[in-house]
Amino acid sequence: MSFMNRLFLSTLFLLITTSAVCFAGTLEGKVSSGDSVVYIDAIPGKTFPAPTQSVVLSQRGLKFVPRILIVQLGTTVEFQNDDSVQHNIFWPSVGGNKKAAHNMGTWARGEKRPYKFESAGVVPLYCNVHQQMSGFIVVSPTPYFVQTDLAGNFKIENVPDGKYTVVAWHEDEKAQSKTVEIAGSGKVEFSFPKSNAR
Amino acid sequence: MFESISVIGQRRRFLLAQLALLVMLSSTSRAIPAFARMYGTSCSTCHLDFPQLNDFGKAFKDAGFKFPENDKSMLQIPPVMLGTPSSKELWPKAIWPGTIPGMPPISFRYTTYFQYTGSSSSKFDALTPPGSLPPFVPATDFETGLFSLFTAGNFGSDIAFWVNNDLSVAGGNANGGLGDAYLRFVDIGRFLKLPKNMLSLRVGQFELDLPFSLVRTIWVSPYDIYIQSNIGVINPLFSQQFVNNRFALAETGKGVEVSGGLHTGGYNYSIAVINQNTGGDVGFSPYVPTALGSNKGGLGVQSNANFKDLYASFNYRFNLERDKASRNAIQAAGPIGPHDHTYLNFGAYYLYGRSEQRLLGEVGGTAAVLTAHEPFYRVGGNMTFNYRCCLQFNALYMFGHDANQLPVDASGALIPLQSLGQTVPAGFVPGRAATFSGGFVDVEWLAFPWMMVLMRYDGVNSSSDRINALITNPSFTGAPFNAAFSSTRNRFTPGVQFLIHANIKAVFEYQFRPSQSVTIAKNPATGLPMAFDPFHTNTVVFGLDFDY
């Protein structure tokens, strides 16, 4: 490769990486209820490759662990029964779409059963044997998502500059969305009507 | 506990049936929300429609009121250690370690009812002796039921406990009574190297391991055959029977029980030895210490009778799933989640006892206490077909038999029962045994997880009950009187129950008694007694029931 070609390629590489660093920002803010989920909604014209690594959601001590699991669209979740009793998992809808209801049936203790989530939205989880069990999977259409801390604070990093629809969800509230512009950084706050999660 | 229904007129019988209904309406229960608190789980984990147990609940009970496996990891409230586990090695120089529940496992249950009784109950007014006011049965009646306390759990080392007490009955303050109260030593067969779950021991006061538990039933009204006592014929116009056995299978027994097997599949058996309890008189000597102590000092025990009843039951349950792993699991694996097994259960039971009746008589001219020993038995079979969670057919048959020892005077002549007290008895001769039979069939359909639809038929055949009811007008003359329509008492009971929450339910039952009674009067043309105007008194019961 000639010197000029190498110079050109190096410059081009420098420009690309610099632009990535210069144009990836941070979205931060606060939600009035802790343990909420914040994510950037689907970006028109942009798709993201599905994660190749699966995520485990366990049933342990008659509870879903973690109780709220956030995954990117296309993720395979492996449901694992870690209890000494039989469990079941079903959901009546995905993102409010009842046609996406599904029942995983029954599987042996210690075994995993996978399911790939190919629709975005909130998935409420239940066990039809232990009716006090409750959990959620939040399927985000983008890789930009986070669960707030108990005070409701959150930060999502490496978000490219641009204008986005940001969604905040809490299990006891109706989801809210706001348009946010990120230019290096962006801030947004959500206020839910109820002050407590429970 | 349950008075003879044959020696009392039909009106009283009706009233007593209502009282029995109220007393038994909620019955004691195996539902104990303390378990829900200890494990942080809903009542529906163990109960279909409380207090009825699902397969997991049966396994929980079989295991000694704990999770069948990995119980420690499931407890949300850790137990209090009464010694470290490692101190087992120090025994006998240390007390064997145990545990107590981390919080007092106490639950309460309360029931309240509204009852409507058919207007034909007023037809029993004809039985009232002249000059007396007939008893008044209100057509509508709000009634409080039972307020009961339950405590149960496990003390470690596979020692389970249960105590329940009715704190209040029908709003009458503390006039309830102790229900079940026992310790159960689970799987003591392990010390004898027996197969797992083959031998357990229960000591105390408890409902017998009946084919269908009355304390754990979801029915508002008791099974008629379970509360049937055996009172022989006392009507002087018929061959009399000196049988006065007030024992009913529904009563709790005081004694010991060995049992084995599991109620979730395969065999299970129980053999119990309990105090005789036929309602006879209990004599006390001031010189014998009693359980409550006496001024003679010491503590002892008292029995209602020297004879101990023996009860035995055996059941075999066939789980019908094709997959062996699913068939042998506590609950079957289904495509939409685990559920109760589809199964067939067959069983048989037998109870042997000996009733005693004592009379003051004479032997060889010397005053003596004469004792009539009257062995009795109750025998029967049962069957259940269950389809998954939601549909169950049950059937039970019982035959009861009491030996009959008739009092005779010194010449060997039978003494009419109504003359006892005027004629001195000198002994007994065997007479015709007193028998009864009957049973029930029912179907229970869990239409929704919160709605159970029920239908039951009860039938009890007792000729002595019918004959004794004719005693109100033995000469068949005079004013018309009521009598039982036949020796078989039939009852159809449809019902429905709604779970408002997992621990609150609304119940409804309609008890329909076809051709329950008939009026007997003199036919003016023939002068003979004739039966006409069959009628029945039906009852509707609404109730609310909650545990916490």
Image (cartoon, rainbow, N blue to C red):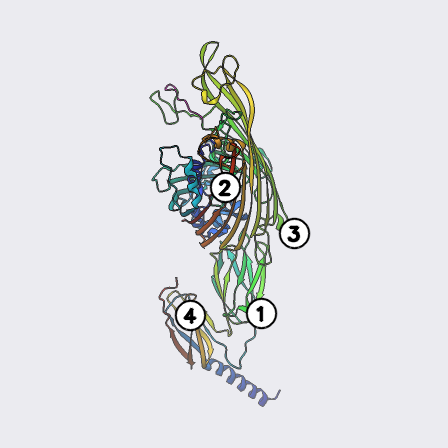
Q: Chain of mark 2?
A: B
Q: Most extreme residue toward the right, as rendered?
A: B322
Could you tell me if the residues under marks 1 and 4 are in contact, i.e. CB atoms within 8 Å? Answer: no
Q: Element under label 1?
A: loop
Q: Nearer the viewer, residue B369 or B335?
A: B369
How many neighbours does mark 1 have within 10 angstroms: few (below 14), some (14-19), or many (20 or more)?
few
| Residue that carries the numbered disc 4 in the rendered image | A174
Q: Which mark is residue B533?
A: 2
| Residue B439 at least partly seen | yes
Q: Look at the image and give the residue range highlighted in magenta.
A: B280-287
> Is residue B282 covered in magenta?
yes
How far separated are the C-alphas under marks 3 and 2?
A: 58 Å
According to the picture, the residue beneath numbered tag 3 turns out to be: B323
The answer to whether marks 4 and 2 sit on the same chain is no
Return the mark for residue A52.
Answer: 1
The answer for which chain carries disc 1 is: A
Marks 4 and 2 in Cβ contact (< 8 Å): no
